[in-house]
Amino acid sequence: MSEKTVLANYIVRIYRFQKNKPTNLVGVVEEVGQKGKKAFTNLNELWDILSSSKEMRNQKRGKTFHKS
């Protein structure tokens, strides 16, 4: 079975960051074509939002996604 690559588009708004600590970010993420926004307060939370959105899309298509 062949696997399709599906790309998602995001709007990431960063409202605040510290120049000397680039991992300290505050902002929101919107996935284009989806309702709602998700807030983040650091780089790890931003990554979790982006990777969980990919996981949710794959589950809807019957695929599983494993973080490496």
Image (spheres, rainbow, N blue to C red):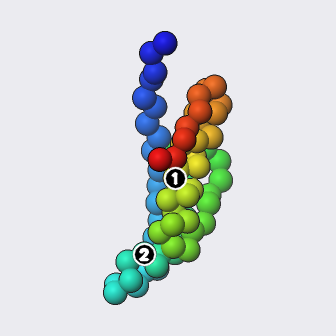
Residue at the outermost top position: 1
Image-based side of 43 in relation to 58, left or right: left
Q: Where 33 sits versus 62, above or below?
A: below
Q: Where 22 sits versus 36, above or below?
A: below
Q: Where 32 sits versus 45, above or below?
A: above
Question: Residue 35: percent from the left, percent from the top?
Answer: 65, 48
- Residue type, mark 2 in image: Thr
Question: Residue 27: percent from the left, percent from the top?
Answer: 52, 70
Image-based side of 28 in relation to 4, left or right: right
Residue under circle 1? 50
Question: Residue 57: percent from the left, percent from the top?
Answer: 59, 36
Of callouts 2 and 1, which one flags the residue occurring earlier in the amino acid sequence? 2
Residue at 38% over, 83% down: 21
Disc 2 and disc 1 in contact, CB within 8 angstroms: no
| Residue 39 in view of the camera | yes
Count the marks.
2
As measured in the structure, the alpha-carbon distance from the residue carrying label 2 to the one carrying label 1 is: 15 Å
| Residue 31 in view of the camera | no
Question: Residue 29: percent from the left, percent from the top?
Answer: 53, 59
Q: Secondary structure at mark 1?
A: helix
Residue at 34% over, 84% down: 19
- Categorize mark 1 by other alpha carbons within 10 Å: few (<14), some (14-19), many (20+): some
Residue at 56% over, 74% down: 41
Q: Give the label on residue 23, or none.
A: 2
- Residue type, mark 1 in image: Leu
